[in-house]
Image (cartoon, rainbow, N blue to C red):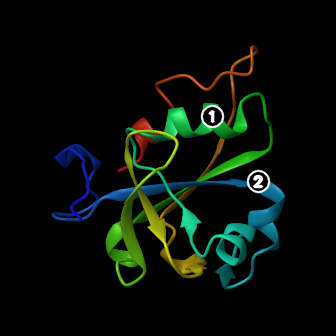
């Protein structure tokens, strides 16, 4: 399935930046590979596109502090990448069916909600890629 993204979201021609939200402490504990709980329980790591990340943050992390956003070129995980329709929203999301090597992460930035707990655009992702 082709990723539903605009050319501005591409790290290189044909390459889309993918974003994953992680708790800072969990990312700091990872050594060469990052293997979140979802990899064991669901079989994949949840990612979002630039267009999806604010909604993902607000749906699952509203009001939470201590979060980090990872940016990964889709080409770095293409062997394990599948674009799949979510069951709870009408959208297609990138899922990575394997561990994430830390050396393929191109950007690691903290993300913070506003005082009311909401993540609003523009997010720091607008400065990435």
Query: Compared to 16, does 123 lie above or below?
Result: above
Residue 85 lies, in percent from the top left, at 39, 54
Residue 23, numbered circle: 2
Q: Which residue is mark 1?
A: 59
Between discs 1 and 2, the one toward the N terminus: 2
Q: Give SS at disc 2.
A: strand
Residue 34 lies, in percent from the top left, at 67, 76
Q: Nearer the viewer, residue 5 or 88?
A: 88
Q: Quadrant location of residue 114?
A: top right
- Of circles 1 and 2, the one toward us is 1
Query: Compared to 122, does 61 lie above or below?
Result: below
Residue at 55 percent across and 22 percent down: it is: 120
Residue 110 lies, in percent from the top left, at 67, 44
- Neighbourhood count class around disc 2 (C-alpha, 10 Å): few under 14, some 14–19, many 20 upward: some
Q: Quadrant location of residue 38?
A: bottom right
**Quick one: which residue is furthest to the front in this view?**
87
């Amino acid at each position: 399935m082709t990723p539903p993204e605009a050319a501005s979201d591409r790290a290189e021609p044909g390459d889309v930046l993918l974003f994953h939200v992680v708790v800072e402490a969990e990312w700091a504990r990872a050594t060469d590979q990052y293997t979140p709980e979802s990899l064991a329980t669901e079989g994949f790591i949840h990612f979002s596109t630039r267009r999806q990340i604010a909604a993902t943050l607000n749906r699952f992390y509203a009001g939470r502090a201590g979060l980090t956003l990872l940016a990964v070129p889709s080409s770095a995980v293409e062997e394990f990448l599948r674009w799949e329709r979510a069951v709870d929203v009408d959208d297609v999301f990138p899922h990575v069916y394997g561990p994430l090597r830390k050396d393929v992460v191109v950007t690691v930035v903290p993300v913070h909600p506003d005082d009311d707990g909401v993540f609003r655009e523009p997010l720091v992702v607008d400065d990435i890629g």
